[in-house]
Image (cartoon, grey):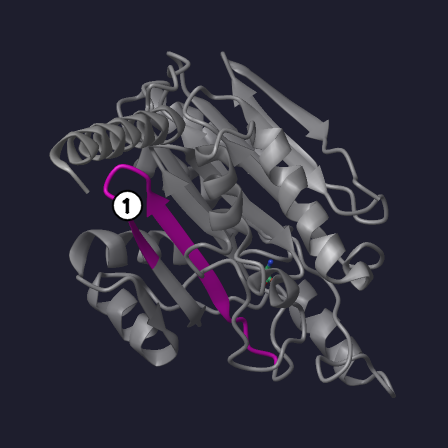
Amino acid sequence: MDSSDRRTFIKSVTGAALVAAADLSAAGSSSVAASGSPVFLSTWKHGQPANERAAEVFRNGGSLLDAVEKGINVPENDPNVTSVGYGGLPNAEGEVELDAAIMDGTRHRAGAVCSLHSIKNPISVARLVLEKTRHTTLAGGGAFRFALEMGFQPEQLLTPQSLEAWLKWKATPNRPSFWLTAENHDTIGMVATDGRGHMVSGCSTSGLAWKLPGRVGDSPLVGCGVYADDNAGAASATGDGDLMTNYCTSVSIVHSMARGASPQEACEELLRHMAQTDPRNRQGDQICVIAMNPRGEIGAASMNAQFKLTYALWRDGESRLLEAPALY
Ligand code: GLY
């Protein structure tokens, strides 16, 4: 290469690098204008009081992390929500095992707990894993001992209703079990922005009813049940966590938004990918996702019309329940 060729080559490489850098910052930075006001988006009907509590905490000066944590505490404390926290249906041995995670999109750090027993607010324990330790995930007995050290009180998480449901399942001949089949999964997933480009994602669940002891679904796994990145957005998921874990749903959606997809496009792209890789995912399986970008634009989608996601949206002081479109 002579010197003029070398100069041309260096110029073109430098130019390409500059173009690539510009592309990256356009796709992946908060050049995405923020909405100016907070938005809270949660899965299912029980997401509505959760959003309302989150908005109240935020309005009263709490951080976005405080808001998401305290919002998720609402269904965790509600004995009538049988897939989250207190009153969540137990595992096959009759013990309630809870999973939760919360992710801060600014620090790009999460805290999570899996298979936590006797503590009804796993999202708050997950928050303390994030704030007080260098770890991301604590499981089982270790998560329980950490919770005690943080001042949480152990409680019986079975309600008379959930105990009765378990006894009934146990007494059913040829009952469905997780060696073969699955039932009852919904979860609370929440994604939120403060209106200034900060994103948080949180998720809490008792997992599948009658699950094998020790089973961990998607909810507490960073990238699966939660993901948040201030540069691109936040996502969460609900449904069959065993299946969805294999697709790293939340991080896939956030990365699609980083490449320029709207939250709705990103949700649908992920579900289409799942349907294309395995057509069995189209029917029968319970797969729903939610997403938000730093502008406060939202997305929500269900794989199929047999398991349609009702989601809760809080924006500009208005709290609504809406139905996500189903792809199949
Ligand atoms: N999506 C909740 C679970 O499967 O555990």
Camera sees residue 198: no
**Residue 311 image offset from top left, x and y in percent:** 65, 34
Instruction: Give the farthest residue toward the bottom.
Output: 173
Q: Quadrant of the C terminus?
A: top right
The region drawn magenta spans: 94-111
Reply yes or no: does residue 190 show up in magenta.
Answer: no
137 to the left or right of 326: left
Q: Is the residue 80 above or below the residue 98 in the image? A: above
Q: Amino acid at mark 1?
A: His
Whether residue 276 is visible here, answered yes or no, is yes
Out of 92 and 133, give the one closest to the viewer: 133
Question: Residue 322 placed where, x, y %?
Answer: 70, 27
Residue drawn at the location 51% of the way across and 48% of the way down: 252
Q: Is residue 44 above or below residue 197?
A: below
Q: Indicate whether residue 110 is drawn in magenta.
A: yes
Q: What residue did someone put label 1 on?
A: 108
**Crowding at label 1, few (<14), some or many (≥20) Cα neighbours within 10 Å?**
few
Q: Nearer the viewer, residue 283 or 124?
A: 283
Mark 1 secondary-structure assignment: loop
